[in-house]
Image (cartoon, rainbow, N blue to C red):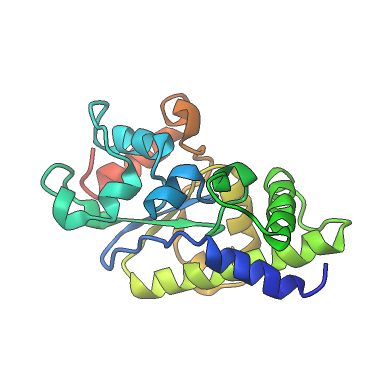
Amino acid sequence: MDNLSEIVENYLNKYKVEDIINQNSKILFILESPHTQEIKQGYPVAGSSGIDMTKFIYGRESKDPFGKIVSQIDKYNDLYPNLSEFSILNVSSAPMQKEGLKAHELDSGDGQVVAILEKLRVNYKSKRHKNKDWNRIKSILLEDFKQRLLLALKQSSSIEYLVPCGRFAEAYLDLIKELEMSIEERKIISEIPHPSFNQWFHYDSMEKLKKVLEEIGIS
């Protein structure tokens, strides 16, 4: 693929969903990538996964997506206390599934990029791939993720916990954490599933997140 770096960077910029970094936050949730609702609403975890996050943290009666309330603290803090304790960041700032862009007409370059992103998404266990284009796109994705994560930790130096949600997010965090001391200094809460399909209510490992929430005064 000619001009691959430029095509990938254009894709990431064109379909980017901004991270939510609150200056005095203590917990940074790291998720995989935006999907349909995130593209539509313009913030991370805007759909059913986001609603399940809010239900887990604030109670089953909660109905608002987590990205919605964390991105609008002044509006929602009375209903959901201590929202400023949270920040949210995606590994990929743009969708890694074509389905997430079904409302958009993709040009050939975008189509090629998202097709490879779909492959990387399901082959997250491999550090390197036989296909050179896969490796090049993965390198760009990792560098973009690393730079945004480092910026988040700089903007919110109070962050104590990194919570990768799902195996993909955890695998990509593992790939960059050893290279950056500021990442290594944070406590990483591992084995937290992605919040899709009610998984946050069915895994024993969620007790680890409950303890962290209790530590910062949310339970």
The answer to whether residue 158 is visible is yes
* Tally of numbered discs: 0
The image quadrant where one finds the N terminus is: bottom right
Coordinates of residue 16 in the picture (x, y in percent): 50, 62
In the displayed image of the protein, which residue is found farthest to the left?
78
Q: Residue at x 41, y 70 (%)?
A: 153
The image quadrant where one finds the C terminus is: top left
Instruction: Say which of 119 and 107 sits in front.
Output: 107
Q: Residue at x 46, y 24 (%)?
A: 202
Coordinates of residue 161 in the picture (x, y in percent): 40, 56
Instruction: Say which of 215 and 81 sits in front.
Output: 81
- Compared with 59, 85 (above or below) is below
Q: Residue at x 15, y 52 (%)?
A: 75
Coordinates of residue 26 in the picture (x, y in percent): 31, 58
Task: Answer left or right for 36 relative to 79.
Answer: right
Q: Residue at x 70, y 54 (%)?
A: 111
In the displayed image of the protein, which residue is found farthest to the top?
202
Coordinates of residue 19 in the picture (x, y in percent): 41, 61
In the displayed image of the protein, which residue is found farthest to the right?
130
Task: Answer left or right for 17 relative to 211.
Answer: right
The answer to whether residue 145 is visible is no
To which quarter of the image does residue 92 belong? Answer: bottom right
